[in-house]
Image: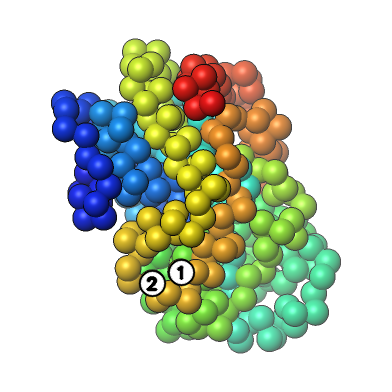
């Protein structure tokens, strides 16, 4: 549904003037996109005279980024890790605004597995990671962020993810929950509310609570950003600024009006029971900042993550991976 459609449903003001079309692609639905959902529902895109269409790609970040590179969408709302590997192949693109600044996906294990490995009494992060041995874990797609995350954790625990466990690409949240409920998998990796549904509905448990810093390598991780081709950023700076301003308003509103923001996000997850939804909201909100400026240290976390998960270096100079020029141009209007 476009932002105008959601705004119309909820009574948010729709500004009657000619609007520019902008297409955002995201690799999933989840609480990773809280400020985008808030901006759509509260009419922040319309305030910028934008007609924002959001397309969800169920096969993960690689598919969503390919749509940007091919011109089917303007902006990829996703992981800089996917962007960095594309840059290494000669693609000219970069991050231009921060969306989520703590690691936003989760790894949920079944109740049977949690009991078998005595998860409640495991406190050492390496011991927790090593407990993945022999398990079957579902991810969104090959090379997706969830795939890399599971591989990183396995290696942190001294495992070979291709030999010591089974990683199964399965698609989006619906497929994961169906397989999880039928006990065809031992766990899965995805963001809330899919992760919290596995806990609330099926009695699962998180291997790590990333927001609480239980997994040291992911502390202060620039998780999701707005990513576009360099020619789009340079050729449409005013549109980029409008998108960033709407995102910034969404971030600020979520932080300053959390109860109202929670209700603004609710229409996107009507199929999620209230208890699961509220749990997902409480777990997710602290992982967002109050502005979209990119912190270089957070971007460098993506470099380390990729290098450790894939066992090969990232060759993109960090200065070429992101820009704060758009955020800085918008900043005076957000004071």
- Closest to the observer: 217 or 19? 19
Q: Percent x, y for residue 198? A: 50, 75
Tell me: 220 left or right of 242. right
Image coloring type: rainbow
| Whether label 2 touches label 1, CB < 8 Å | yes
Residue located 80% across and 74% down the image: 122
Tell me: 217 left or right of 176. right
Q: Earlier in the sequence, mark 2 or mark 1?
A: 2
- Closest to the observer: 74 or 36? 36
Residue under circle 1?
A: 277
- Is residue 214 visible in the rendered image? The answer is yes
Asked which secondary structure carries label 2, the reply is: loop
Residue located 40% across and 65% down the image: 173
Dot 2: few (<14), some (14–19), or many (≥20) neighbours within 10 Å?
some
Residue located 54% across and 70% down the image: 279
Numbered tag placed on residue 272 in the rendering: 2
Residue located 60% across and 23% down the image: 316
Tell me: 101 left or right of 20. right
Q: Percent x, y for residue 228? A: 41, 27
Q: Quadrant of residue 274?
A: bottom left
Q: Quadrant of residue 135?
A: bottom right
Instruction: Check the image and report above or below for 333 versus 163.
Output: above
Asked which secondary structure carries label 1, the reply is: helix
Q: Percent x, y for residue 110? A: 57, 80
For marks 2 and 1, give the CA distance: 6 Å
- Is residue 82 visible in the rendered image? The answer is no
Q: Residue furthest right?
A: 124
């Amino acid at each position: 549904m476009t932002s105008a459609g959601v705004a119309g449903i909820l009574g948010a003001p729709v500004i009657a003037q000619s609007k520019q079309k902008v297409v955002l692609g995201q690799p999933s639905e989840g609480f990773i996109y809280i400020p985008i959902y808030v901006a759509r529902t509260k009419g922040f895109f319309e305030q910028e005279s934008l007609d924002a269409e959001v397309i969800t790609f169920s096969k993960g970040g690689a598919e969503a980024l390919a749509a940007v590179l091919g011109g089917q969408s303007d902006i990829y709302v996703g992981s800089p890790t996917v962007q960095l590997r594309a840059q290494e192949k000669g693609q000219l693109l970069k991050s231009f605004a921060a969306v989520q600044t703590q690691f936003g996906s989760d790894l949920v294990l079944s109740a049977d597995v949690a009991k078998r490995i005595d998860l409640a009494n495991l406190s050492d992060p390496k011991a927790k990671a090593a407990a993945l041995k022999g398990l079957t874990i579902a991810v969104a797609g090959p090379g997706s962020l969830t795939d890399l995350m599971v591989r990183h954790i396995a290696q942190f625990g001294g495992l070979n993810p291709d030999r010591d466990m089974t990683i199964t690409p399965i698609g989006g949240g619906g497929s994961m929950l169906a397989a999880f409920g039928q006990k065809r998998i031992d766990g899965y990796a995805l963001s809330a509310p899919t992760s919290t549904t596995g806990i609330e509905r099926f009695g699962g448990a998180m291997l790590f609570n990333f927001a609480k810093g239980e997994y040291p390598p992911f502390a202060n991780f620039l998780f999701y950003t707005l990513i576009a081709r360099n020619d789009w950023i340079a050729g449409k700076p005013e549109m980029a600024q409008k998108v960033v301003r709407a995102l910034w308003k969404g971030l600020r509103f979520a932080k300053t009006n959390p109860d109202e923001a929670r209700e603004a996000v609710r229409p996107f997850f009507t199929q999620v029971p209230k208890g699961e939804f509220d749990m997902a909201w409480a777990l997710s909100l602290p992982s967002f900042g109050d502005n979209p400026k990119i912190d270089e240290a957070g971007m460098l976390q993506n470099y380390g993550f990729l290098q450790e998960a894939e066992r090969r270096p990232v060759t993109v100079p960090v200065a070429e991976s992101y820009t704060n020029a758009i955020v800085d141009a918008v900043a005076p209007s957000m004071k």
